[in-house]
Every structure is written in structure tokens, then in C-alpha cells.
Image (tube, grey):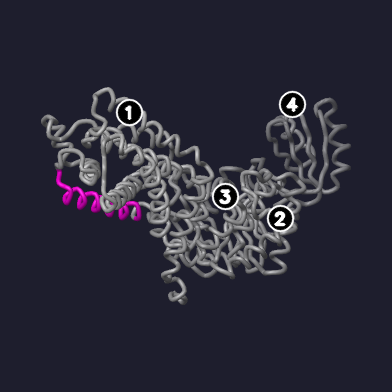
Amino acid sequence: MSNSLETRPAASGFWLPVVTLWQRELVRFWRQKSRVLGVVASPLVFWLLIGYGSGDLARFFAGALVLTVLFSAIFSTISIIEDRREGFLLSMLVSPAPRISLVFGKILGAATLAWIQGLIFLAFAPLAGVSLTAAELLELIGAVFLVSFTLTGLGFAIAWRMDSTSGFHAIMNLLLVPMWMVSGSLFPMATAHGWIKALMWVNPLTYSISLLNGFMNLGSGSPGIGLSLAVTACFGGVLLLASGLVASRKSLVSHA
Amino acid sequence: MILVERLSHQYGSRRALSDVSFEVQAGEIFGLLGPNGGGKSTLFRILSTMMTPTGGRAEVAGHDVSRDPAAVRRKIGVVFQTQSLDKALTVAENLRAQGHLHGLSGPKLRERVEQVTQRLGLAGRNKDLVETLSGGLKRRVEIAKGLLHRPVVLLMDEASTGLDPGARRELWQYVEELRSREGVTILLTTHILDEADRCDRLALLHQGRVVAQGAPADLRSRIGGDVVVLEATGAAALSRQIETRFGVKASAMNNVLRVEIANGHRFITEVVEAFPGAIQSVGLHKPTLEDVFVKETGASIE
């Protein structure tokens, strides 16, 4: 084409949309602060009930933390479905901003929210008997971000092609919640039986849980922290790529 | 500025567009008129690069919409029928985000936001949350958003939906100004006859086909003389009787008969006298775009 120079996105062409979308998520979040309560409250209640009931608050802490992050990620990505039909996403799609930066900006923004809510939940860690040095705490905060990014990527990749929010709810109940259940959040891998154990090995969320347990010095340490970090990071990268791919598919409107 | 050649689109087995061709010159206001489901929205989605057509091709500002959507996106401004504003953000925040998506930032962006809000009478509203605005104001923000990056082509999908007559008039004043002052080419979809009448040229879409195109006045002049509308319970039978007696074509739709005829007033007295008691009501008007549409398709736009 005659103006190929003009059509090649410069570095700012990539980052400007990322930053603006990230910022948009934060501003929206700040203006709807009650969302925090919705996301953090129910995992907190689950944790306290199961924890006090079984007499082991530490055992379920990482699971509840991941649940908080998962809820936040679902909450953010479910908005994509409506947003694409009628909403801000429409004008993003007909703008010259590269698709991948739109995807990255949206995921980064939603992941940041999940992260913030995860950190709010983390404030209850002393109740679970977690005590960390400052350096350990920083590592843990980084790990929570990694898990947030991964779960948001998962939500995005699922939500993008969906035509209705009820479809997303179905997937949430049939895929995401069971995934969380067999991730070591409720029972450790060591005591799991037969095929459930195999399922836990292939479940990427297992590695998120053991990553957080590892950084909090809780739990069994299986799978190991190095492996957990590698799997979680890879999973996040794969989901980012997958999201980029589904979002750059040419026909953006599947319905008539 | 816009070139559409033998464009077709199929949703699964349903054909939404077949063999649509037209051209829009630079600086024109071009309307796509037709009933809902006629193919306007599909065409709009293709031209705005949201969807690739299954057949034929379309060019906007010299770029093919399927092969080079990125180049097209740089040239177009899009005003959607549905809302594309973030309600939780303020007017200025929405516009700034839009600017960022188009690679605008810093003082240049501020200047553009200021210009476009002033132009659309939104200057005092910059800090208002979009959810607190009235329907008419929201529309204006939508348009401001579409114009922020100074597109050469503005695509508007049923842009006046939900606007009261006053707001619609304002919108049109602005559209016409935009064309005459800045030479922006405008393509809009509508099912409102008044709006279609204000376009320079029109394409009438019905069941995915262009059934007629041209300037509104030229389209209307395809119908000679007057249009006489008769309401009668036995419209179909009456139409045959009128045709044999007067040698004119009388098309029946439900209980309504339409006759295109010169000197309609004379025909009215004759027809009422010829069929006493058969006719419930009589009307006469100069041809409208609705008449053109009925003539070409046998169906109504509304």
C-alpha cells in the first residue's frame, strides 16, 4: 500500500491504547468501590466457615485468595460480552489501535483490579498464621499479580467469543469453579485419589495454589515452587497469546 | 470516496446482502434507506470494518475494507446506533480514551477535545459523567467521539435513534455543516423518510438488494404526478375494477390502494362517484420516498 509507513504502528501506537484501557479499568473500579465488597466478601465468608469449621484456617487460605482473584477476573471479563455488542469496545474495534494492545490493555487493567482485591484479602493472612519478612511479602505480592494476570487471561479467552453472559455463567459453573475445586484449594494433592489426582496434575490452577502456598510458607510444597512459578507464568503467556488470537479473528460480529 | 462493488453477505444460510453496488463521492451525504432487516446494518458493519463480506468488495477512502482494515480505520469515524460510550467515565475521559486509541495524546489531544466539544455544544459538560447526560447529549458525545480524529469519512448507523425532533434537527444542521465546512463524506443509514430526504443521494435497500438509487428528488420524480391513496375493505377487488375502468395501475396493500396519476384531484372525484360506498377514505399527496419504496418493492418502509 502507498502509505505503509503510516500504517505501521509506532511504539506509542502500541502503548497508548494499553495505558488508556488500563486506566479506564481503574477509574471505573474506583467509581464503583462497592464492587470490592462483592468480590472479597464471599471468599472471605467461605474461608472463615470452612476454616473455623475444620479448625484449620491456614489450609484454605490460598484457595480463598485464588477464589477472590478468580471472582474479580470473571467479573471484569464478563463485561466484555456486553461491551462488545453495545459499549465502549465497539469503538475500540473500529479504531486503528492494534488488536493485541487492546487485548493486553484490557487484561492488564482487569488483572490489576484482581490483584488489588487479592491484596485486600491478603490483609487477613495473619489470621491464617502467615508471617513473612518484607522480602517474602514482596515476592508474594508479585506472585498474586502473576496469578491475577493468568486468571484474567483465562476469563478473556473464554469471554471474547461468547454471545451471551448466560453462556459465560455456564462455563464458570462447569469449568472454572470445578477447576478451582481440584486445584488443592479444598484438599491437598497428597491425599487425593486416583483420577482426581491426575486431574490436579494437569490443572494449571493447582500450580497457582501451590505457588501462593509456597510463598506464604504454608502447605505441602508439592508441586515445588520453581515448577509452580514456571507453569503459572507459561499458562499466563499462553492465555495472553490465545486472547490475542481470538481477538484478531476477522469477523467481529458473529450474530446477525 | 466509498466504492461498493457487487457486495454480498451471508449469515450461515441467510442472505443479508446480495450484489450491492454503489459509489459515494467525496463530500457527499449518502443515505442508505430501508426497513429494519433490509441489509443496512450489515452494510454498515462491513464498511466500518467490523465484518468481512462473504462476496464482492468495498473500498473506503481508497482502501479495501477486508484486505486493509487498519488503513480504513484510520480514515473513518463511526457513530454507532447503540451506545459506545463508557457510562462510568466523564465526557472528557471518553474522548481522551478515544483519542488515545487513535494515537493522539498530549497538547494536540487536549486541543482536539476542546474543539470538538465546543463545536457540539458540550463545552460545559466535560466533567459530567456520561450516565448523567440526556439522550440527546449522549448522542452528541458519540458524534464528538466519531469526529475527534478528523476522519475523512463519517459512518453513522441510525444516528438519530432516540432523539426528539429538536435534537434531530440540530444533529442534521451539524452534519450539513460538517460536510460544507470540512468536506467530510458522510454515509448514514436510516429508516426515517425526513432524514433520507436531506441526503444528497440515496440507495434504497430491500431484502439485501439496492432497489433504487439517486437523489431524493430524482427518485420521487420517477412517480409521475400525484399519489392517490384510497382506503377500502375490498381493496384487492376494487383495484382490479379501477384498473379496467381507468386504465391506471392500482396497487393494493392490506386495505390501502395506491394509484400514481397526473391530476389526482380529478381522478378522486371520478373514482368516488364510480364506486359509491366502496371507499372509506381518500388522500392525495405529492410522491414521497415511501411511495418510491412501495413502487419498487411492493412493501412499506415502516
> Measured from the top left, where is residue B159 in percent x and y?
64, 50
- At numbered mark 1, what does the secondary structure look like: helix, strand or loop? helix
Magenta stretch holds residue A228: yes
Q: Magenta residues, as a range? A: A223-244
Q: Nearer the viewer, mark 2 or mark 1?
A: 1
- At numbered mark 4, what does the secondary structure look like: helix, strand or loop? loop
Magenta stretch holds residue B193: no
Q: Main secondary structure of the magenta part?
A: helix
Total tally of numbered discs in the picture: 4
Residue labelled with disc 2: B124
- At numbered mark 3, what does the secondary structure look like: helix, strand or loop? loop
* Measured Cα–Cα span from mark 4 to mark 1: 75 Å
Q: Camera-side residue: A41 or A216?
A: A216
Residue labelled with disc 4: B233
Q: Camera-side residue: A99 or B89?
A: B89
- Kind of residue at badge 1: Leu
Determine if residue B203 is in view: no
